[in-house]
Image (cartoon, grey):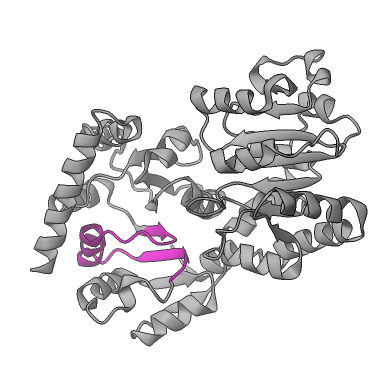
Amino acid sequence: MMRLVYTLFIYFYFASIRFASFFNAKAKLWIDGRSGIFQQLKLKIQSSPSPVIWVHCASLGEFEQGRPIIEKLKKDHEDIKIVLTFFSPSGYEVRKNYTIADHVFYLPLDTPANAKKFISIVKPTAAFFVKYEFWFNYLTELKNNAIPTYLVSGIFRPDHYFFKNYAAWFRSQLTAFNHFYLQDEQSQKLLNSIGYKNTTVAGDTRFDRVSEVSKNIKNIPIIELFKQQNPLFIAGSTWEPDEELLSGFDFEAAGFKLIIAPHEITEARIQFLLSKFKDKAQRYSQVNEETIKTTNVLIIDNMGMLSSIYQYGTVAFIGGGFGKGIHNILEPAAFGLPVLFGPNYKKFEEAKELVHLRGAFVVNNGKDLQSIIQLLTRSPAGLLAEATAKRFIQHHIGATNTILGDIKF
């Protein structure tokens, strides 16, 4: 009965997205990307004696956690084929040309028929779900076919529906997983409390990813020309409330150059930023070696550069803390940058830990921003924060080796 209710909800959800697609660009991508998906699967995935590993990520953030798994699998097992799926357009549209995966698709809607058809075409040897994706019909089909299934970088919280008294049916989804590789001990204790002992606290694979990125960076000459000898404040993955805060601070008077990389690269967002900083700002795509020297604010209007730009930074500000929650703080920390963000960070264990260690700082308003910048640039606290951020990353690497050292193919 509950499976029927769940599946009816999935169809209702699909209908809602289809309706929204008439006036919402992201919803349209979600619908159009799944059109003819099984024809694409049959066309691109040929029968092969090579084992196929299925890796599923909700979106871009989860992809960064799954990526170290994918890349180590391909490095250690040349014959393995990787099928990578995404639920969200914000993951698929950015990584659809990710060449280390052999095939990249949207995940078809989680219905019994779709799950059966998907598994019959892909024929995965094993499946990896990243962080907290739980699709009942897919998990049921994997279990029915005795396909080893793993949750990696998993995280659970006490308020999750799995731990509610009414949630016995939802908890049954978890029986499909052969093993849970978790980020923290709290998650392990929660799973243990409902009878799941097949758990390992492996850590978060994102630490492995950002550590690797920091060791394999390329110089960006135009950023070097922009920075020159000035301290550089880098604001990454920002939203409008973050940018309102930043625009109220005089970075030039404080001796800083400023780079802003908004979370969404749309013309409307770029124009908003240009209007906030007026004649002080230029967009990256329109500067050259001469004009870059005359600006104090550089707006990044492309995807993919931010992680490399952090190598030039003095201080980083990560957006999202005045909205639903902060974005990736680990990339700047890997380069030893003290990290600033807004007050909505409590759901992120790495942020809480780094704040406690004084490698990250919470900004509630413009007064906080000014006092923290002064603290980091006019006292030993800045050097201490840099060292703390680097040690923090190094202390947490190793999750990928723990996971794949445990699983045999």
Q: Residue at x 28, y 42 (%)?
A: 47
In which quadrant will I find the C terminus?
Answer: bottom left
Q: Is residue 154 magenta?
A: yes
Compare residues 53 and 104 and report the one nearer the observer: 104
Question: Compared to 81, does 171 lie above or below?
Answer: below
Q: Could you tell me residue 322's position as x and y percent?
A: 55, 51
Q: Is residue 297 magenta?
A: no
Question: Compared to 64, does 143 lie above or below?
Answer: below
Q: Residue at x 51, y 71 (%)?
A: 406
Left or right: 299, with 9 as reference point: right
Left or right: 292, with 407 as reference point: right
Compare residues 394 and 378 and report the one nearer the observer: 378
Q: Could you tell me residue 246's position as x and y percent?
A: 68, 40
Which segment did they paint magenta?
A: 127-156
In which quadrant will I find the N terminus?
Answer: bottom left
Residue 200 appears in view: yes
Compare residues 393 and 317 and report the one nearer the observer: 317
Q: Could you tell me residue 167's position as x and y percent?
A: 24, 76
Q: Residue at x 73, y 51 (%)?
A: 367
Residue 283 appears in view: no
**How many callouts does the rendering have?**
0
Left or right: 312, with 173 as reference point: right
